Amino acid sequence: MDDQNGMGIEFETFTWKIENFSRQNTKNLRSKAFRIRGYKWRICLYPLMKNVDHFSLYLMVADSLPPYGWNRNTYFKLALINQLDDNKSIVKETHQKFNGGYRSWGSFFMNLNDFYDSKQGYLVNNTCTIEAHVCVSDLSTLQANNYLNKIIPSNETQLGDQVARNSKSTQQEDDKQTETSYESDTLSSSATCESSQTEEEVQGSDLTLKDLLDLESLGKEEASFVPLLEEACIWHPSLIRSQRKSSRWFKLWAFSSLGQVLHLLKTNKVKDMDENACNHLQGLWEELVKHSGFQLSWLEPYVQSALGIKAHLEKITEMNKLKNSVVDLEIKMKKLREELAAAEVEFEAIRKALAEAKKGFIEIDLNADLGYAMF
């Protein structure tokens, strides 16, 4: 167990070592079920999703549970271990609530080309190691967010503010049969979906951005948004599902608009959020929320935080002016003190000279007549 930052948050760890990786069915690879705090979990690995060259990891509820009427409030971290340099291990962490509609959450970790390069240290001797650190807690979402805000990312590739990946598919295999069918903690790709799901929903959950948009035809600006959009879609497949039946041009507009917002938040500095930048973001956001059809509650806090920076910058400007005034006055006062000190020295010297000159001196009336004597 790990006690994080003295906050009383304890994680239990499951380590998944995948040997003979190249021989595995990596299109849909899952660990054996493991139990933490009385709940069953699995790690899912999707390095070869349809038309996606990303290495992604997800934490999945492995219990046989109904499609509704339950939830599981969870802190967790997923780690791809670097076997050559532990400091380069990639760790993604978040706080999420699992339920019948959100049985698995996860994230993009790295490009497959980098993963397969043994010099990078993630796949060495055809073996990789993955860890899940899980804590099931009853703390409120607010407390969870406050806690996560204090966590320092363990790798620069992490996203500052992370959000969760929603997957509609559920697993109903018999845990006992599944666990005995794997070697080195690996599973085959067999899985079934909730009986309440339609075939269309299952197919929709496998769609990617490349399935919806002709990425080759995008302009230079729109193409620069693609990595951000792909990351967002991995975390939030609902973005893909909401646009499956939209027209080509509407899809292009919706994702381009979302890309503009993500790009602005990703690339702008706090100091850049002046009145023009805030007005631009406000316009983009209002149009996106009103017309796109996306579920964007995960993004709204970041947008509102960015929009609130204008008032903060104005306060900073006011404070900086006051600070500059204080500095200017301190300099002026120092100069005046130096002049006063010099004047006091000069005054004392002249006073002494005056006192010396007065010795033996007889004052006369300067207005008196000079005159002369006749006798």
Image: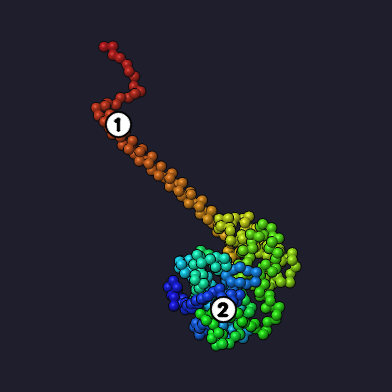
Q: How crowded is mark 2: few (under 14 residues within 10 Å), some or many (20 or more)?
A: many
Eye-nearest disc, 1 or 2 = 2
Q: Residue 354 carries which label?
A: 1
User: Residue at the spot x=54%, y=86% of the render?
Assistant: 180
Residue 109 rendering spot, x and y as whole percentages: 55, 68
Going by the numbered disc 2, the residue's amino acid type is Arg
> Relative to residue 227, is residue 182 depicted above or below?
below
Residue 348 visible, this orientation: yes
Residue 229 rendering spot, x and y as whole percentages: 63, 65
Disc 2 target residue:
30
Q: Nearer the viewer, residue 342 or 316?
A: 316
Sooner in the amino-acid sequence: mark 1 or mark 2: 2
Q: Is mark 1 on a helix, strand or loop?
A: helix
Direction from residue 105 to residue 133 in the image, left or right: left
Q: Which of 127 and 325 is in front in this view?
A: 127
How many marks do you count on the picture? 2
Q: How crowded is mark 1: few (under 14 residues within 10 Å), some or many (20 or more)?
A: few
> Relative to residue 12, is residue 155 depicted above or below?
above
Q: How is the image coloured?
A: rainbow
The quadrant the N terminus occupies is bottom left
Asked if the residue at tag 2 contacts the one at tag 1, i.e. Cβ–Cβ closer than 8 Å, the answer is: no
Q: Nearer the viewer, residue 130 or 327?
A: 130
User: Residue at the spot x=33%, y=35% of the render?
Assistant: 346
Q: Nearer the viewer, residue 129 or 242?
A: 129
Residue 152 visible, this orientation: no
> Relative to residue 273, is residue 118 depicted above or below?
below
Going by the numbered disc 1, the residue's amino acid type is Leu
The quadrant the C terminus occupies is top left
Q: Is mark 2 on a helix, strand or loop?
A: strand
What is the CA distance from the residue labelled 1 to the residue labelled 2?
Answer: 102 Å
User: Residue at the spot x=44%, y=71% of the render?
Assistant: 5
Direction from residue 334 to residue 74 in the image, left or right: right
